[in-house]
Amino acid sequence: MNVPPVRPQLHWLTVSLVVLLAILTGCSFLKPSAGEEHDYLLSPIQSPGSSAAQNRPGAYVVRVLPVEVPEYLQTSDMAVQVGTNEVFFAKFNHWAEPLETGIRRVLVENLRAEDSGREVFTDEPAPEGLTVYMISVQVMEFEAKDINGQGSIDFEAAWEISSTGKSPPIRGFFRAPPLPWHPGDYAGLARQLSQALTDVSRHLDRAISAQAHAQSVQ
């Protein structure tokens, strides 16, 4: 049986309709719909801490240096550890800014909130004549963990505080207390990691205050 050839006009009409449909839909069949993608920001402390500017020994300012994060976290995709040696990256759930930028931003805002009378800088010049305490933070872990359906948050960081005064640098390590997490709740992941940054900010604030006090009595 002979099959009649497809007419060229019908073939080009079909191709044209497919191209037009792709343009009108924004090639939605090639990418996830807008409803599937979510971007998250880390958030600072919502209310000031208990530190009082008038009780701060001497005059000093704080500078937060660029934060270091592991290479595997230098991605916009949120990371979830799903095994001893396996990390899952949530392709449709992203950090809205580079993680090292967001962590540094929140640390600055948190330290300002802890003591509203203290100036906290990043890269801009600090006032002359004041002791400057410089904070460097190296993040070791900043992710969620999903082991057999049991979720938790991991945050570990090493830190160092040095100054332009006579005090030697001090170093420490911070590990967030166990924080529960429901696997798949990426808004909750951003919220819990923000809470962990609140905890480390208060930890750093106490360390700076202690160092400033020790320097003031020398």
Image (spheres, helix red, strand yellow):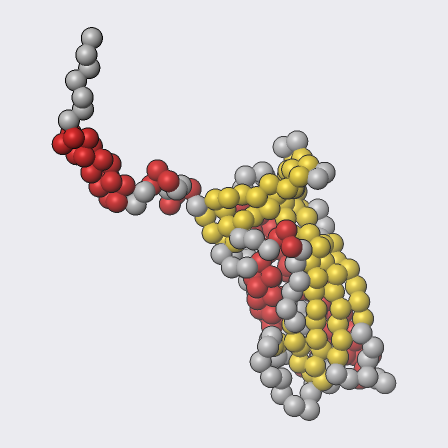
Is residue 188 at least partly visible in the picture?
no
Residue name at image x 61 percent, y 43 percent:
80
As drawn, is 46 to the left or to the right of 23?
right
Q: Which residue lies furthest to the bottom in this view?
A: 129
Q: Quadrant of the C terminus?
A: bottom right
| Quarter holding residue 151 | top right
Please state, as top left, top right, bottom left or bottom right, where the N terminus lies in the image: top left
Judged left or right of residue 36, residue 128 is: right
Between 194 and 21, the one nearer to me in the picture: 21
Residue 120 screen position, x and y as percent = 62, 76
- Write down the quadrant of residue 168 in the picture: bottom right
| 5 w.r.t. 193: above or below | above
Identify the residue at image location x=70%, y=65%: 137
**Residue 112 visible in this rendered orientation of the protein:** yes
Which of the two residues, 11 or 155, is positioned nearer the viewer here?
A: 11
Percent across and percent down for residue 138 are: 70, 62
In this view, the residue in front, 70 or 158, is 70
Q: Where is residue 92 in the image (x, y as percent from the top left)?
A: 48, 44
Residue at image location 30% in from the left, 45% down from the top: 26
Residue 73 point in image, percent of width and height: 62, 53
Instruction: Check the image and report above or below for 179 versus 55.
Output: above
